Amino acid sequence: MRETAVSVASCRDCSTPFPALTLLPSLRGVGWSPVVPDWLLCFTAVKQPPVTPSVSLPGRKRRLGEILMDAGLLLETQLRSALAEQRKWGGKLGLTLVQMGYVDESSMVHALSRQLAIPTVDLEQHTPSAVVLQALRADIAERYTVFPIAADPATKTLTVATADPTNVEAFQELAFHCGQRIQVVVSSASSIERAIRRHYHGEVTSTTATPLSFGMDEPTFELAPPAESAPLSMTVRAASAALAQPGRETELTQRVEELTQQVAGLERMVAQQARSLRAMLELLETRGLVTRDDYLAKVR
């Protein structure tokens, strides 16, 4: 079997030397056990003695659409339609499939987990430590739509949740940024986005949130609440102080539930507006009044 040589490069952030790429169909001759799967991924960003590879995917590299088709969740015609949509407006294929109604996020997560033998994680129930959060900057997590789950300083391994474990190039870049091995688990894109907002930015999120993305670098829409909804701006510190007052716990719990429902409603409204805007842009493009390049240049 062919073996790939490992060249030496430097981290773009800290100039630490590391193997530029470790992508080995065979590991014979580099000091690791020859008893390995036929196809092995190991993303290494720090030069160190050989350790157990961080990500192992059996069989050849497979694309997201192929995996979903093999799992019986997607038809070939649907995949072609989604790919055409992705080429037109950009964005990630998984998100495009969900937005077009071809696959739901939960089914996609379980299919990827079964087909690739990768664990899943429920980010609504997982709370990472401060050390784990510090291992991955917020802007990097947002750029690659990943969320840190665990960090092992001994092996320099960072475990992240991702919605697309087939995106090899993204994990290679992530390893370069972090200077650590990258090990992946699977979660939905919307839960990853909520976890980032919740743990990095201190936002209150709803599990009914709908991921929004209809361009390559689309702007983020922020809705200013009306005057009568001022409690939406209540800070965590103020809430904690109020909670300490006798008899306020039940009242505040009910208020939090009400606010959660309001936020979910606002997110659904924004999602509907995004779909309407997308339809309008498609109509304008069909009539030759705007091009995709014009749109992308405008929103950047």
Image (spheres, rainbow, N blue to C red):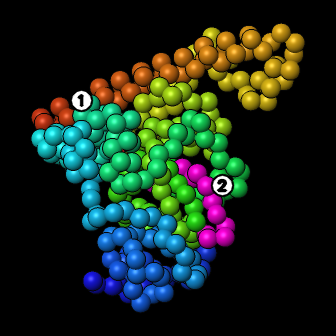
Read off the residue under disc 1.
Answer: 280
What is the count of numbered marks?
A: 2
**Residue 245: x percent and y percent?**
87, 16
Read off the residue under disc 2.
Answer: 132
Residue 246 occupies quadrant: top right
Q: Around disc 1, counting alpha carbons within 10 Å, would you say few (fewer than 14), some (14 to 19), or many (20 or more)?
A: few
Could you tell me how far apart the alpha carbons at marks 1 and 2 are, in whole angstroms? 42 Å
Residue 281 occupies quadrant: top left
- Magenta stretch containing residue 222, yes or no? no
Disc 2 residue type (three-letter): Val
Circle number at residue 144:
none
Q: Which structural element holds mark 2?
A: helix
281 over 4 or under it: above or below: above
Disc 1 residue type (three-letter): Met
- Residue 139 visible somewhere in the drawing: no
259 over 31 or under it: above or below: above
Q: Around disc 2, counting alpha carbons within 10 Å, would you say few (fewer than 14), some (14 to 19), or many (20 or more)?
A: some
Q: Which structural element holds mark 1?
A: helix
**Residue 179: x percent and y percent?**
57, 71
1 or 2: tag closer to the N-terminus:
2
Question: What range of the chain is rendered magenta?
Answer: 143-156
> In percent of the image, x 55 and y 76: which residue is there?
51
> In percent of the image, x 53 and y 68: which residue is there?
181
- Magenta stretch containing residue 147, yes or no? yes
Residue 186 or residue 191, whichever sits in front: 186
**Residue 296: x percent and y percent?**
31, 47
